[in-house]
Amino acid sequence: MTAILPRTLIGTSTPEKRTRVRNRKAWLGVLAWVIALVAFAPIAWMILTSFHSETTAATNPPSLFAPWTFEGWASFFGAETGVSPLPYFINSAVTSLGSTLIVLILATPAAYALSIRPVKKWSDVMFFFLTTKMLPMVAGLLPIYLIAKQLGLLDTTTILILVYTSMNIPIAVWMMRSFLQEIPAEILEAAEIDGAGFFFKFVKIIIPLASPGLAATALICFIFSWNELLFANALTSVSAATAPVFLTSFITSRGLFLAKVCAASFAVSLPVLIAGFAAQDKLVQGLSLGSVK
Amino acid sequence: MSLVTEKPVPVTDAINPPVAQSRFHKDGPLLKRLPLLPALVFMIIVTQVPFVLTLIISFFNWNSLYPNDVYFSWFSNYVAVFVNPDLRNAMLVTVQITVVVVLVSLLLGLGIALLLDRKFWGRGAVRTLLIAPFLIVPVAAALVWKHALYNPSYGLFNGILTWIWGLFGAGSQAPQPDWISQFPLHSVELELIWQWTPFMMLILLAGLQGRPLDVIEAAKMDGASEWQIFRYLTFPHLRQYLELAALLGSIYVVQTFDSVFTLTSGSLGTANLPFTIYQQFTLGHDYGGSSASGVVVVFLSIALATFALRTVSTLLKDESK
């Protein structure tokens, strides 16, 4: 317990003690695996059920080893009803990709002006962006609905793109700022000495250097837009309804439809799972608005 | 563009002779501000205009079903917010969901982060599996929990109960609770905890991996026990990450709409504020009332956000040091 003893004396431990420590470490690894498998079980169950027939999906106790079939997936693609889910996915893709693109175009220069060559009172501006993120979206639902109605934008992807852009700009500004801050100032100064203008600096130096951060920001904005339900549900009805709105048709249960529900839920989540795993290393930085690296 | 020079930065001033200054800081004040303006103006218009509109509408008696009966009604909508038992209930439910979900997922996230902080076989795979719940679209997650897990006759939970009882030859006597009807609020909370634990885990893991390892190594050399290391070294370092995770988590969980909408449709005493406002607006057509509730929610969030901002600003200060 004292620092006076020579290190070699404290550092050596008896062989039994070492095995005990190693055993406990192995046990903790097993525990981590068990927790991970339990946490993942609902997702595994969702995927498995989507490949079962409606009758084997709804058994009690569960039929784990029932033969696989694509009935649920066929039904999700509209085999019986003839209603294809594709338009919903297209709307989701248009709104998510469209808003993400606008967010990047607006937020990257803003982040530049807040980090590399900071304007006066840059921290006030940062906090303005942050407070807009902390106010509940639902408080803006009615006025945005009324404005959209007035402008004839109800049930269009345009209004959703605008809403999602405003939803994600604060996240993107904060994230991009933390990425731009990592660019060494010397590189920019060297370019300036060589007479590079703002536009050249921005396109030829900052964008390439910040591209991993830019990609992570894009993926996170994409995820948040793709997930959104409240506004999509309130502002669209038929022609601009997104994939999450499509899922709301499964809220009330009717007959045997478990395989179909699971197929639909998995299909709608797939783009987010892909984007999320692609951005895995930068996910924390994005979710914590760049404050944790 | 403009050739107006900014005040030279002291550091460069020391390095460069004054002559170089005019070339060095070519960006004038306007050019410096220009990249910021599009995003700033967009955000001011898109967030502040609706809020002002909400504030104005909240003082009117306005039901969209009676378009000819719109008049200024002073604070009557606000009185209704605080008198109406539904709304008061919604506030309590919101607080309960937020506190339970944030605390439980924070504790679980801390435990899992501590487990993941050590080397073991397949750590990367475990991490990936653990993040997955956060990457399921919230409506989809709620649907799967509602139909595939909670369903009393064919859900996985009751299926597992039947299977376990079946092992003892009593499969028909297994308890088969109707999870959502019997425990509506806990059902919503459990599903949210499942989705939010990875979020907490990720932030805390990042915090753990940023620990000063040399200090911990030194403490180990001095014979400090694992508990002592956690209590006196890891925990103080982790504190700001715990605060940040709790506050960001609260900001997101307060806004929960999808789970309540999907699992219970706001019935059985699970309607929180976002759901209630949505319902007031879509079903009740009460524009004045839902605006007043919106304003109240905004002020509640401002109280919460003030704490959050303070935490974030300390992190920002640390960074600029």
Image (spheres, rainbow, N blue to C red):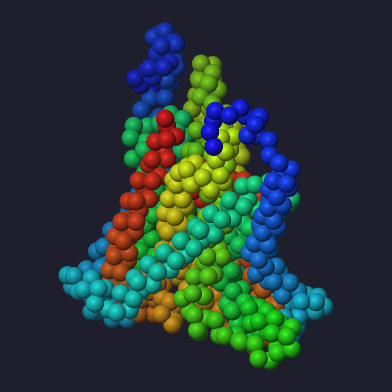
Out of A288 and A128, give the one closest to the viewer: A288
The percent coordinates of residue B222 (x first, y second) are 56, 35
Q: Position of residue A290 (x, y in %)?
A: 49, 43
Residue occupying image coordinates x 70% and y 50%: A20
Q: Residue furthest right?
A: A67
Determine which quarter of the picture holds residue B223.
top right
Q: Is residue B52 positioned above or below B59 on the image?
A: above
Position of residue A201 measured from the top left corner of the image (x, y, whole percent) = 53, 27
Residue A123's x, y, as percent? 36, 38
Q: Is residue B19 left or right of residue A57?
A: left
Report the front residue among A65 and B257: A65
Q: In the current view of this chain or complex, which residue is farthest to the bottom? A: B172
Q: Is residue B247 visible?
A: yes
Quadrant location of residue B240?
top left
**Image quadrant for the N terminus of chain A?**
top right
Q: Is residue A51 left or right of residue B57?
A: right
The residue positioned 29% from the left and 60% from the top of the image is B299
Q: Quadrant of the C terminus of chain A?
A: top right
Vertical placement of residue A44 versus A213, above or below: below
Q: Is residue B206 visible?
A: no
- Total marks shown come to 0
Q: Residue at x 32, y 64 (%)?
A: B297
Q: Residue at x 24, y 77 (%)?
A: B83
| Observer-nearest of B26 and A65 | A65
| Residue A24, above or below B93 | above
